[in-house]
Structure formats: structure tokens, C-alpha cells
Amino acid sequence: MSDLHVYDTTLRDGAQQEGLNLSVTDKLAIALHLDELGVGFIEGGWPGANPKDTEFFRRAQSELTLRNATLAAFGATRRAGGRADSDPLVRALLDSGASVVTLVAKSHGGHVERALRTTLAENLEMIRDTVTFLRGEGRRVFVDAEHFFDGYRTDRAYALEAVRAAAESGAEVVALCDTNGGMLPNEIADMVGDVVGATGARIGIHCHNDTGCAVANSMAAIDAGATHVQGTINGYGERTGNANLVTIVANLQIKQERDLIEPHRLAEATRISHAISEITNVAPYSRQPYTGSSAFAHKAGLHASAIKVDPDLYQHTDPKAVGNDMRMLVSDMAGRASIELKSRELGFDLDSGSEQDKAKVARVLATVKDLELRGYTFDAADASFELLLRRELDGKLPDFFDVESWRVITDSRGEQDALSEATVKVSAAGKRVVQTGEGNGPVNALDHALRQALASAYPELADLELVDYKVRILDTEHGTDAITRVLIETSDGSTTWSTIGVAANILEASWDALLESVTYGLIRAGVAPR
Amino acid sequence: MSDLHVYDTTLRDGAQQEGLNLSVTDKLAIALHLDELGVGFIEGGWPGANPKDTEFFRRAQSELTLRNATLAAFGATRRAGGRADSDPLVRALLDSGASVVTLVAKSHGGHVERALRTTLAENLEMIRDTVTFLRGEGRRVFVDAEHFFDGYRTDRAYALEAVRAAAESGAEVVALCDTNGGMLPNEIADMVGDVVGATGARIGIHCHNDTGCAVANSMAAIDAGATHVQGTINGYGERTGNANLVTIVANLQIKQERDLIEPHRLAEATRISHAISEITNVAPYSRQPYTGSSAFAHKAGLHASAIKVDPDLYQHTDPKAVGNDMRMLVSDMAGRASIELKSRELGFDLDSGSEQDKAKVARVLATVKDLELRGYTFDAADASFELLLRRELDGKLPDFFDVESWRVITDSRGEQDALSEATVKVSAAGKRVVQTGEGNGPVNALDHALRQALASAYPELADLELVDYKVRILDTEHGTDAITRVLIETSDGSTTWSTIGVAANILEASWDALLESVTYGLIRAGVAPR
């Protein structure tokens, strides 16, 4: 494995993106995905600067178990005129429990004087004092040299001085930041080469995409001697975004044969990129290199005939290397192999190679493709996928109950909170039940009514709890006339599962996902139809 | 002006994008925008290969008046074993009336033998014959050397032979194509430099974005001697798209001071990019360099305070150069400075430094912080933020109508689709109205009922349309007991605005966002309370 640092800043710099707001729970979930992808470092946020990030690091200490990655806390050099050991924000970095601290430091004289409003000398002292203090407390320290390249252009000597101040005080890496994103690859290469030669420091690179060159700039810096690269998943970030870390890693690994992360982890990149989109609720960019849904999709008739001869004539790499698919040949998400794998996991062995098994896989694949065309996605709905498999392979699902009808009323009067009330009519264990449930929202009311209606036939359902609910509007052309996709996560106290519903009506989609959740819960608990 | 060719292929290669389908009328409208932008060449399509493109060139002859650009027809070298002068597709190029013909030619031996299924020698003859014939007919001829770089890697001598065959027969430009998009800048630079030296031909570059490097690859080729660059508006194109022509031009012109198009035309780039999005019906990518709606948007409070001191400290170029604007996003990361800036953007000047202004800013900041703690976010809800500012600064909003109550019923029976029906009771213009509206979802029904109820008092509302609806559950610990955040985007046909609602009940949140949308729409239309 290469010793190049793969440093992810999705949770800090990526979160600066317009419209992207992450809860602490979101951040913990994304960190697990990043760890699975195999990045070396996960920058979790700025503890002390805002309560959410402080809370993230607090919860991470007990709730987040990372297998590959090291968690880094982001912060700034101490205040001008103060002392690092008594600076509350520097203290908060220690309290975060992170073993790596990444300090943003000014390296551009104009920014020191006009934005920070201190002297050039004091800024260097702030770097030395803060790095020295944190090293003394046993932390690994990385320094982000903010506005480095713009600073280098206006005052090379001072920019180099800032790098030296950090390195000589014990910073392990000094990452040069193209904070405003205006650089082009050739300039980056020249400047990074010069800094490596002139300072001897370990140099990192942090780019933004304002000239459309974030990936190329990062790679130019690495060619010139940088051994630490920062970026974000899906290129999230302020303005035009940060450098897309997956694109950089895939380029380095696939095109330049550098071993950065294990190939089986890179092969999860597409799935992880999409899973993180579900958490951020930012629609995935279909034209994203390597992991976009269109990245290996072929439309040109010219190409289609040639692709049959040899797919490699018309693709720049094997999409499987990043877990993507050539779209002309297989369905978007669920390839044959994943269906075989998932079936085996569930006790259906379809991997024998017999014609009968092949036909079954083809049938499941056709159903999945059809549903995906209609807006379903099974990446994030394991339980619905298992129900689909059981339905296709066994012919039907256990017949736990029948639904006659449901209705929800939500009303609001004056300044009072709106109230929702649902009535469901179902039959189970030979009995028809009409049950009304209340809730502070329509889905909540439906969930209460349904589980109460089934409670006497299936007391097992009392243990279930709805723990997450996600809504996505699929066709944004028509606003509320569009198709709605609902994902519901249910817990039975020990495990959780996810189900999906798709319909024009948001409540119908929610109801479908609720029914699948209850059915799955009963199968899982080993209950027989009554 | 530089003699570098700016060659747009939006109408041909860009149209290969998944989900992008252009009518002849669309193409004519886009061509006018491209002409206004100041590109040198507009590749209109492949006449003869499909009736739509034949029709485009036919209509262009009488309907399209270009002031700056030259129209180019795309086609292929003649069939193997035939003659250019009797090849119907070559004839169709002459019939198109275009003075420039761009011929795609193979330069990769493997593609000649396996996709084209002819000999290496015959392929060269096809190039010579077709170029010579078209030159003889008085056309300027450009040649696109397909798969050039992959071909160069496997057989440099043959790839160069293909370039020479084209140039020696009279092709004015040979554009080297990274058809599969897998190249990186350094390789491109080396290979282009070699081709320029070895053949003496005028070389062009055509890149795709599969490694995220289309812009950097194009610029590397230009650095190495290419004097013709191809790309598309908004980077449209197959898979990950073609090189974004506006990004390339802006980089060359702004960062490298090359005169490619007149500055007043570049200053129309953002408007033209968005206007073309309207025609293609592909949602604009907000993170697009230079022209994206987020390209000059700032969220971090850290930056906002410095931006007040000097905007150039935090932007890589003046957004006006490409017709874009700096925008401040208000969020929990932003502080006082971003509120002052945002207020100025909206026409409230709070920046006087007076105690009164400071107090107003402090009050707005406190309100924003309080609302954000409760789940609001204003960086994606400009219109709601403007209403908040007006409420805080003017003391109240115009009193357009009063809401007495609202109710939505959604029900489903058997296999039928669920139906939603909403009843609202409102007073406006001195009259109480009870109105029922239907919809295929509860929000749709509420929207219909509300706007119908207000229609007689405010006929202006008839023009409004809900164009996007986003739902986010904020605290995932409690599932449907959690807080729901709804963002609604509304259009009045010429502009759009976003409003937010936050409540435990998803329908209450939606209702709140609808009310803000209608209120904002009325203020925007200059309507007085009736």
C-alpha cells in the first residue's frame, strides 16, 4: 500500500455545501460508510465552534467504531495575542478525543492583515504555539495552509515561512489549500514542487473545483511531491464543491496503479456514494465520474454495435472496479451477481449454474429492473428486496392479514398544532378489525392504527418501532404531481430493517412501506400466519 | 483575438446525454444562444444519419442567422470499399449547406479492424478520399480522430499516419478525441506535443469527463500546441459528459488572459447556460464552475466576515465576468456579517454601523439562530429568509388573508390509488371562503384548495406553480415522531423561489411552506392586501 494519505473532509468542508445540513446521526452514519470505503482519515467537524460538532465527537467516542480510518478534529490556530494552552477552542480540540488535529492556519499575508487583523509575525507565532502545544499533548497535528496558492503568488517568502513554522513545530503534514479554487494544474505543480524542495515538509493538497480542475489540480500536486490528498465524497463542498475524493482515488489507483485502498473497497465506491446521497438528501449527480448512474451508460447507436464486439473498445475502465455497471447491458443497481449473493444469504441457492437457477435469477432481475424504472431502489431497502426475492422464488408471501381500506384525516384550527387521525380496516386471524389511531403526523397515525389493529392476532408487533422515515420526490419537473419514494426503517429492539414504498401519493407510498415493514417483522420473528 | 477555434458540439455530441432529447426547434433556439455567447463554430448534427438533423440543416438555411459562429455539419468518412462522391451520407453533408464539415475518422487500429471491420490501409484511403472530395466541393474540412489517444498508446505510428492522411488531403484541423474519456492531463500534453511536432498539422482537442479531467485535459492540449478546442454547454454529453466549453473559455480568458470571445459576451455566460437548461429541460447543476447557482455562494461564517472587508479575498474571480453573482447563504455557520450582506442583497441596508442597525442585525441573527435550532434552514429557502427579514425589519408582513382552518383527508380502498381531498377556510378581501380541492397527494390537494380559495381576491395566484417539493426528517432518533422540514419551490413562469416549513406534522410543515410561498408570490408581484 502507498503511504499517501487519503483524507476525507465530507463531514467538515463538504458540509459547507448549499442545501446540505447534517445531523449528528447523519454524520455518524456517513463516517461508517467512509470507513468502509477505506479512507485513511475522516475529518469529523470543528468541535467547540458549533454545538453539533462538539456533540458529534462526544458521541463518536462511544458510538463510532472505525476499522480503517482515523478520526480528525478540525480547528484553528489560537487567537492573536493569546496562548494556545488557554484558548477555549484549542482546548475543545483536546476534549474531542480525536488523535489527529487539523489546524487551519493563514499563509497569505493579505489575509493575515485584513481578515485576521494581526501581524505577519504574530500569525507565525500562533502557528508555532498551537502546533507545539497540541504535539505536547500527544496529538498528531496536520496544518491546512489556507489560501496558500494565492498567498504564494503575492508573497512566496511568507507563504513558505508559514509552512516552515508548522513543520518545524511538529506538524506531520502541511496541506496547501486552494481555498478560492482558482488554480490550474500547471501552476499547482510548479508551486508544490517548489514548496517540497524549499521546505522539506510533508506536503498535502486541498482543492476546490472553481475552475473545473479540482481533480487534475490534486493529481498535479501529487505528481509534484504531495503525499496527502484531501477531498469529499460526491465532491460536496461550498460553491462548486471540493475535489471529489473517489475520482482522485480511482484515477490514481486505476490509471496510475498506485495502491491506495484495497480493490474490494474501491468496488464499493458506487454503492457508498449513493448511500451517502440518501443520507445527505442531495440528489446524486448522474454525470459524476466513476460512480454516477450515467458514468458507464451508453446511448450512441454507433457505440452500441461496437460494444457487443468488445466492451473495452468503448469504456475507459471496467466499471466493476468502482462497483458501477455498464448500463446498456444490466440494470442500474441490481446485477446478476448481487442477486445470487443476496439469495444465498437468505437461504435460496441460485448459484448452481443450472438452467432453472439461471431462469430464476433472470426473472428476479427483470422484476427489479421493472420496479427500478418505476422509482424503486433496493440499495437502501434490504427488507423490501428480501420480500421481493421470497415472492419471486416461493411464488408468494405468508398471508398474515388482509387490508380492506385506510383513511387519514389531518386538520388544523387557528394556532393549534395539526392533528392526524387514521382509520384502518383489516382482517387477521379470521377477525375483521376497524381501528383508529392518532399521531402527530399522518404516517405516525397510520402506523399506530395498523399495529393496534393487528395487535390481538400478532402481539409480536408491539415490539416494533419506526425509527427512520425518508421521503424523496423523484421527478422534480412536476412538484407534488411527481412520484414519491418513501423509505422506512423499523427496529425490533435488536436489529433494524428498511422497506420502500413508491406512489404518486406520499401517504400511499408510506402505507406500502409500512405494510412491508410489518410483514417483514413477522417473518423475521418466525411467526406463522394466524 | 486569439485564433484558437472555440468549437461547440452541444447539438451533436452533447445531445448524446442520457435524458436529453432536442427537437429541431430546440436546436435552432440553442444555436442562437451559442452564437450570442460568441463561439466560433456550432456543430449542428449529423445530416443524413437521422431525419431530425437533416431537417435542422434544412431549416437552418432559411431560419438561422448567425452573427459570429459558423455552422458545421458532422459526418463520417465514406464506407469501406466505396467512393466518397457516391456515398449517400457524404452527399448529405454537401446537401446540408454547411460550409464546414467535420468528419469522424478512425485512428485506432483495433477499432478499424474490430468495429469498422476493414483494413488499416483502407481506413487511411477512406480518410484521404472523403477529405479530398469535400475540399474539391469547396468545403472547409475538420477531422475528428476518434479514439486517438487509446490508439496512440497501442500503435503510435498508425495513429500519426491517420492524422497525416487527413492533413495532407486538405483537412484544416485534426481534432484528437479522447472518446472513452480515460485520459489524464500529463499524458494528453505529451501526446499532443508529439503529434504537433511529428505531423505539423493543425491540432484540435475533444475531451470527455470520465476521469473528472475534461477541462484540464483540454487545457493541457492547448498548452501543448492544440489551437482548436471542442466542448459543450453545461458539459452535456454521454456518460460523464463532454468538456464544459464555458469553463474552458473562462479559464483561458480570465486566468490566462487569452482573448477568445469578447468580454461582454462572456458576461452573458451564466444567463445563456441557464437559458439552454430551460430548453434542454435538464436541471441546472448548481455546482457547475463559473455559471452554477452555487458557484459564488458563501455559507461559512468564517468567510462572511472577511468578505465584508474585501470580496476578492474569498473569490477566485469577479463573478460579473461570467454574469454570475456572489450570494450569501444564511445558515447556522453564518454570523452577523452574512446577515448584513444578505440584507444588502435584498435591499435592506443594515451596514451603516449605527447602533440601531447593529441592534436590528442582532435581532435577526437571534431569530435565525432560534429557528435553525428548531430545524429551519435558510440557505435553501431564500424567499422565507426574505419574509423573515421583512417581518423583523418592518415589524410585520402585508396582511393578505387569514386562515381559519384546514383539513386533508386521504383514503384508499382495495387496489385503487389513494385520493386526497383538502378543505380550507380562509378570509380575504373581506370575504370568508370555504373551498375544497382534490389532488393525487395531500400537499397537492392543499395547494389546490388554498389557491382556489384565494383566486377571486388575488387572481395573480393563478400563474403560480409548485415546481419542487422536498421533505427531510430531522431527528432520526424517533422516526415519525420527529420534526419534519419541507422545502417548496414555486415558479411564476419567469422566476422561482423557495420557502420552508418545519413542524412535527409533515402536512403542517407543508402548509406553512405553502403559505409563505403564496405570501412571497404576492409581494413579488407587487400586489397590495385587498
Image (cartoon, coloured by chain):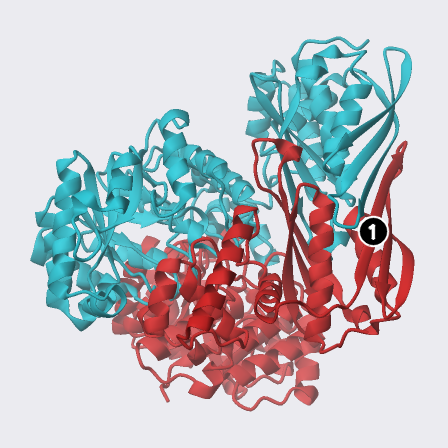
Chain colours: A cyan, B red
Quadrant showing the N terminus of chain B = bottom left
Quadrant showing the C terminus of chain B = bottom right
Query: Which residue is rendered at x = 70% and y = 62% of the image?
Result: B517
Q: Nearer the viewer, residue B376 or A504?
A: B376
> What kind of residue is marked 1?
Ser
In the rendered structure, the answer to whether residue A442 lies left or right of residue B359 reads: right
Q: Is the residue A515 above or below the residue B115 in the image?
A: above
In the rendered structure, the answer to whether residue B157 lies left or right of residue B351 reads: left
Report the chain holding disc 1: B
Query: Which residue is rendered at x = 76% and y = 37% of the image?
Result: A442
Query: Which residue is rendered at x = 77% and y = 53% of the image?
Result: A481
Q: Quadrant of residue B523?
A: bottom right
Q: Position of residue B223 (x, y in %)?
A: 28, 72
Q: Position of residue A148 (x, y in %)?
A: 22, 62
How packed mark 1 is, by other alpha carbons closer than 10 Å (few <14, some 14-19, many 20 or more), is: some
Q: Nearer the viewer, residue B206 or B309?
A: B309
Q: Is residue A194 visible?
A: no
- Per the image, the residue denoted by label 1 is B405
